[in-house]
């Protein structure tokens, strides 16, 4: 019996089994020779996944060239430094397909050292993680949407009280640093209870929507914000806005609402929908509080109500422009 041949056959058979195993998994095996930086092997599955034939993967440059440009620097630097240090690692990146698309890959890399402890080669597996990435992106998208919804008023689609509170605090802090005037315009629809009673809640909702839309058109500078404060009350946050400019914006609100000509037979302030407004401007001092300013503007609004409605009142002591 020729043991040598039998042993040789066993080894060959075993190698065949391993090759079949490697090439029938969904993960794509590969090997790079460290000295030459050439692919010693890449599984044929790569052709199925990316469209590039196995033979076209010659050197690491082919790998780098077929990576999304935005991922390239980070992934290459990371993999090279880990490999040089002899540390096993993994990296996620988008691989270019022959058709011009991208597939998310997780590359899991093992650093093989020779008897002297020097890096001999890299072997690894590429996994197609597109599904997982899609799921992650979907979660992120839903999260952003949820966050946006939590800051938006459901009826009118403009900012809600929560968003106003956040932005007001941020602008307050900014105004304190910059010493630039910060203005608020608070607006409450007149005799809205009678409107609902006379025309019904659906028309009431429609009225709120139209007014919200008009206010959003007025608060149009990038940092301005029109928000529904609650019920039939709205508020405009106007950073870097002088008392005169804030007053002019309040007047625009009055005109815009008049321009909508929403009939309101039950109003004692006219035969169309009107609003009462409070306006205030502050140059923020170190010790002053946003809530005090907001309350002062709200008091001006109620002074406008008490004064007969369909008018604008200004917070007393509003600083000169
Ligand atoms: N249709 C509709 N009505 C609302 C909504 N939110 C608040 N309201 C109504 O707004 C009305 C507010 O009434 P009041 O607070 O008495 O104020 P008003 O009738 O406008 O009186 P003045 O503000 O004093 O002129 C109530 O009838 C609420 O039901 C809403 O989302 N949709």
Image (tube, grey):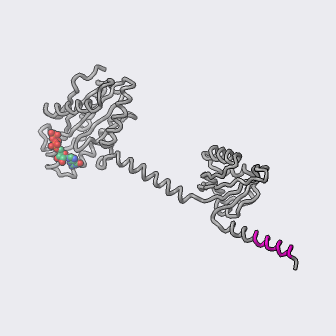
Image region (quadrant) for ligand 1 = top left
Q: Is residue 36 above or below residue 28?
A: above
Which residue is at the far bottom?
Answer: 1
- Please provide percent x and percent y for residue 252: 27, 32
- Please provide percent x and percent y for residue 259: 25, 38
**How many marks do you count on the picture?**
0
Q: Main secondary structure of the magenta part?
A: helix
Q: Which residue occupies 34% across, 34% down? A: 169
Q: Quadrant of the C terminus?
A: top left
Q: Quadrant of the N terminus?
A: bottom right
Can the viewer see residue 17? yes
Q: Nearer the viewer, residue 305 or 94?
A: 94
- Please provide percent x and percent y for residue 21: 69, 69
Is residue 271 toward the left or the right of residue 244 in the image? left
Q: Nearer the viewer, residue 144 or 122?
A: 122
Magenta stretch contains residue 9: yes
Which residue is at the far right?
Answer: 2
Q: Which residues are magenta?
A: 3-15
Is residue 33 toward the left or the right of residue 195 in the image? right
Which residue is at the far top?
Answer: 320
- Please provide percent x and percent y for residue 112: 73, 54
Q: Which residue occupies 34% across, 37% down? A: 225
Is residue 82 toward the left or the right of residue 312 in the image? right
Residue 293: name its quadrant: top left
Residue 44: name its quadrant: bottom right
Q: Is residue 173 above or below residue 156?
A: above
Can the viewer see residue 192? no
Q: Which residue occupies 20% across, 29% down? A: 313
Q: Nearer the viewer, residue 58 or 157?
A: 58
């Amino acid at each position: 019996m020729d043991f040598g041949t039998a042993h040789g056959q066993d080894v060959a058979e075993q190698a065949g089994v391993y090759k079949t195993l490697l090439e029938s998994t969904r993960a794509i095996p590969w090997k790079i020779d460290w000295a030459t930086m050439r692919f010693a092997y890449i599984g044929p599955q790569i052709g199925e996944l990316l469209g590039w034939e196995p033979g076209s993967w010659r050197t690491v440059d082919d790998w780098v060239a077929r990576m999304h440009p935005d991922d390239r620097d980070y992934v290459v630097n990371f993999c090279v430094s880990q490999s040089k240090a002899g540390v096993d690692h993994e990296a996620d990146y988008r691989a270019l397909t022959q058709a011009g698309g991208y597939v998310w890959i997780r590359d899991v890399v093992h650093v093989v050292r020779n008897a002297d402890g020097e890096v001999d080669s890299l072997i690894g597996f590429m996994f197609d993680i597109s599904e997982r990435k899609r799921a992650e992106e979907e979660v992120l998208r839903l999260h952003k949407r949820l966050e946006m919804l939590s800051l938006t008023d459901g009826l009118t689609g403009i900012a809600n009280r929560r968003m106003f509170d956040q932005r007001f605090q941020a602008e307050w802090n900014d105004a304190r640093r910059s010493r630039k005037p910060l203005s608020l315009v608070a607006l409450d629809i007149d005799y809205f209870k009678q409107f609902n009673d006379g025309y019904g809640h659906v028309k009431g909702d429609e009225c709120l929507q139209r007014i919200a839309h008009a206010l959003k058109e007025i608060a149009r500078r990038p940092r301005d914000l029109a928000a529904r404060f609650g019920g039939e009350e709205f508020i405009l946050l106007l950073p870097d806005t002088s008392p005169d400019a804030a007053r002019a914006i309040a007047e625009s609100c009055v005109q815009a609402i008049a321009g909508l000509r929403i009939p309101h037979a039950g109003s004692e302030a006219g035969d169309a929908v009107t609003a009462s407004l409070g306006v205030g401007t502050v140059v923020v001092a170190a010790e002053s509080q946003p809530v005090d300013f907001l309350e002062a503007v709200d008091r001006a609004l109620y002074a406008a109500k008490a004064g007969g409605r369909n008018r604008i009142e200004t917070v007393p002591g509003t600083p000169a422009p």
